[in-house]
Amino acid sequence: MTTTIASLVRDRAVSLPKGVAMRHKEYGIWREYTWVDYWDEVLDAAHGLLALGVAAHDRVSVHSENRPEWLVLDLATVAVRGTTVGLYPTNPAAEVEYLVGHCGSVVHLAEDQEQLDKILAVDVPEVRTIVYVEPRGIAGHYDDPRLMSWSDFVAAGAAHRAAHPGAVEALMDQARPDDVMTLVYTSGTTGPPKGAMLTVANAEFAMRTVFEDNSFVAPAPGPKDLTLSYLPLCHVAERFFTTWFNAGAGVQTNFAESIDTVPQNLREVQPTLFFAVPRIWEKLLATARIKLDSATRGKRLFARFWLRQASSIGRTLVDNGGSHTTGTRIRYAIGWLVFFRALKTRLGLRRVRYASCGAAPIAPEVLEFFMGIGVPVHEVYGMTENSAIATANRPGRVRLGTVGEPLHGAEVRIDDQTGEILTRHPSVFAGYWRNEKATAETITADGWLHTGDVGEWVDGTHVAITDRMKDLIITAGGKNVSPSEIENALKASPFVKEAVVIGDGRRFLTALIGIELDTVGEWAQRRDLAFTTYRDLSEKPEVVALVKDLVKQVNERFAAVEQIKDFRMLPKELDHEDGELTATQKVKRSAIDASFGHLIAQMYGEKVSA
Amino acid sequence: MSTRVSGRPELYTAYGQDMAFLNTRPKQLGVLAVVVVAALLPLTVSDDLLKLLGTGLVLAIGAIGLNLLTGYAGQVSLGHAFFVGVGAYTASVMAGDPDGRAMGLGITFVPAWILGAGVVAAAAGAIVAPLATRLRGLYLAVVTLGLVIIGGYVFTEWADLSGGAQVGRDAPKPVVLGADLTVDGAYTQEQKLFWLFLVVLVVFAVLARNIGRSKIGRAFAAVRDRDVAAGVMGVELAKYKLIAFVLSSFYAGVCGSLLFVANGHFGPERFSGGYGLLLSVQFIAMVLIGGVATVSGSIMGAFLIALLPRIASELPSFLPFVTTASNEHPNVFEIEVGLYGLLIIAFLLFEPRGLFGIWHRIRTYWKSFPFSY
């Protein structure tokens, strides 16, 4: 019999009925769902899907923030051998039309009125039913025949369950390893998003690799661990960390109220396992710095002293692969008692025993800071197409600036000619949905996956990633430059939110830099610098001077050809809605060229047309 | 039903946890520590100081009562001394000797005359409340001030009750399980009374805290913050103002029943004329200095006021120009009276949230450590 995430939860409802599966904050209170509650609702939802006529291999799309219903519908879909497709809550209507139309889903879940308006505004003929979760503003205001509330959906499922007992269980028994359980659409920095098909077997291998064979952390994740779910669930990393960790390892999943409340929710939940993208780590670091700097005098001096200790402890840890020496252990123990413990509690990281960072490159300084204060952040590497399974830094064997060692059972090699990283293991995806051509370009006949990342071996054990292959800049002088390395060095400053390095085919490198409104705003306030808007603040001579200074500092660390010769301030915050960022907050270079071409032209002394 | 998640004090899985009486572990341990220290205090502190502290405990009960009315429900009252007097005389009459010079019913069971004093004072409060609830601010203050004057007159003239001016009557005798606490035995009078007062205070402080976090307490706060808005929200103003007066008077009555137990004797002049007003002002001072709308603040304020004479009497050793002789100026008695005013003004200006505010600031400093917010 095939193990799916649905059968895992079913078994857990038997072995740990009273255990907490999820917590979701409603009206200020974290409501708890036990495994029995969870499985019961999954069964109702699965029967609800059957009642709606969903057959094996049909697609069900979910357009919602992270919440229990997301997981319930995902599992229900897998239980009836369907395929779940997640959409980013920030996806605008045009992208919803493309994604829902491309996957051809028959049932669509829209979280609230906002998401419902998007799907109703577009033409998606294959969608038969639209289920909404939050009735506010919807009930009684819309008369589309496809609409159905979540409670009606579950009630219909319960009725179907009473009429056809065992129907879902029978389908679960028929599950096959090559059933496509989910389509994960890539963010599409260059072209339209592609839907990677992940099968039941892909997920099973991925979970086994992380939880059993080669656990990132000892002891392995289990029912005593708490996680915080806040990144978009349609991304493979968060799906792994939320749904698969929950189903596979039995960890207690806590849903953050929204991305903006993550700091507060972190403090409340105090997770033991924590995954974040670089942007979140940078934000946490910036928040800590600002709050420490704006503390009262006594606290500030005290914090400064211990942060100096932290950075020296961090450096030692980095040199030792993440292990303490006797000296640092004693220093950290004293610091823990009087400072680090309190700091970590306030950041919500006090109980974190394993933290990881992935999905984009991160500046080593950020990792060093967190290691110093006692939050071991491990950089991991994976991508949608290999179910996020490739390499990871493991506790005690951390090498900063690398993404770690290949995981057990995962073959990783680097192409001699192009330097591209290739992976091969049972978690490599089945292909792109309705896109044979792209599939053939990505997977070779003998099963190797082209990751599109350029990398190299460090000491023969760890992999260091240079950049995305298509992002590499070749200057007019023929030099290969990795822009992300420079961009991350710039973004390590708390004042810089976005940095886009330009120079492909040009004589020298330039950059477009966007400031972080919170930190620079605070910095300006302390200098009595009045400002109105983001643009106004960006263009203040003092702010430009501040950034110029930063650029100079960063330049000192790079060779002459890799130095930023000129820069411009971005006049607005980059935004998904405006098409400048992908749903995962990655910069779309083509959109940047189009929107800010005149700034780029200025820097290269070309005539400005616009 | 839901259990707390260990090690995560801010993760509430039910509203009950958030609103619990002592909702965090440090608070539970802190309160336990304070009670234990207070219970052990009589074994180490000298008797004369212990007597003052005992008075502080009794005054704290009255201060908590006034805080329910003034702090929680926002109704100013200068008439607290009147209700304290009603309590004092009720308790004396109930416990008094039936064959004595003044009225007496001979009920020696201690809880009976403590609660009886509270109930009669509360009834007095209920009679006054319908008048008082129609008024606000200054008018309410003046009306309640009138109570002190009427009360002073009645107590002085009703000689059967009070023993008459300059004569007075005996306070109730606290006889617990056959042992008279005012007679020295294995423990001194002061030690035994301190424990009695402590037990009563703890009971009534817990009660007040629970009232504060109940529906009644929330209604009080709504009335205080804006009575018109509270009325619009569906809080019955007349009802809750009445409850506030009744509760406050009840506490005042309990305070009055115990106030003279240590001295054993008291005269009606304690509630008439300048003294009656002074007692009312002292209660206001306890509330303002301690902290408005806090039970712990009321207790801190009561102790400070109770210890003020002692503090003033220590002054001559620090300030040589202050004398202890009452015919020279400035003397400690004048300073003591001046200090009430000075403390009230200083707290209103610089620390409006009272001693509790200072404590709160210290707590926030460490709670937010190493940040400042």
Image (cartoon, grey):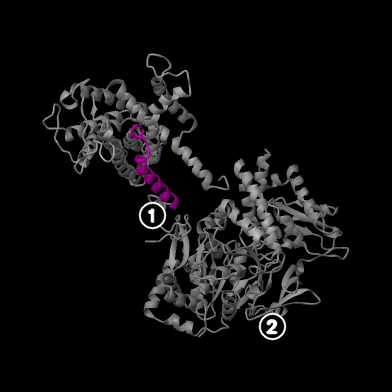
The residue sitting at the left extreme is B99
Quick one: SS at disc 2? loop
Q: Residue at x 24, y 25 (%)?
A: B151
Percent x, y of residue A586: 68, 62
* Residue neighbourhood size for the residue with mark 2, other residues' Cα within 10 Å, grouped as few (<14), some (14–19), many (≥20): some
Residue type at mark 2 is Gly
Give the main secondary structure of the magenta stretch. Answer: helix
Depth check: give the residue in front, B233 or A144: B233
Percent x, y of residue B170: 20, 29
Quick one: SS at disc 1? helix
Q: Disc 1 versus disc 2: distance between alpha carbons?
A: 57 Å
Depth check: give the residue in front, A172 or B271: B271
Residue A149 position (above or below residue B8): below
Depth check: give the residue in front, A108 or A174: A174
Residue A54 position (above or below residue A506): below
* The magenta stretch spans residue B39: yes
Q: Which residue is mark 2?
A: A447
Q: Residue at x 72, y 64 (%)?
A: A401
Q: What is the span of residues highlighted in magenta in the rendered image?
A: B25-50
The residue sitting at the front extreme is B186
Percent x, y of residue A105: 55, 74
The residue sitting at the right extreme is A477
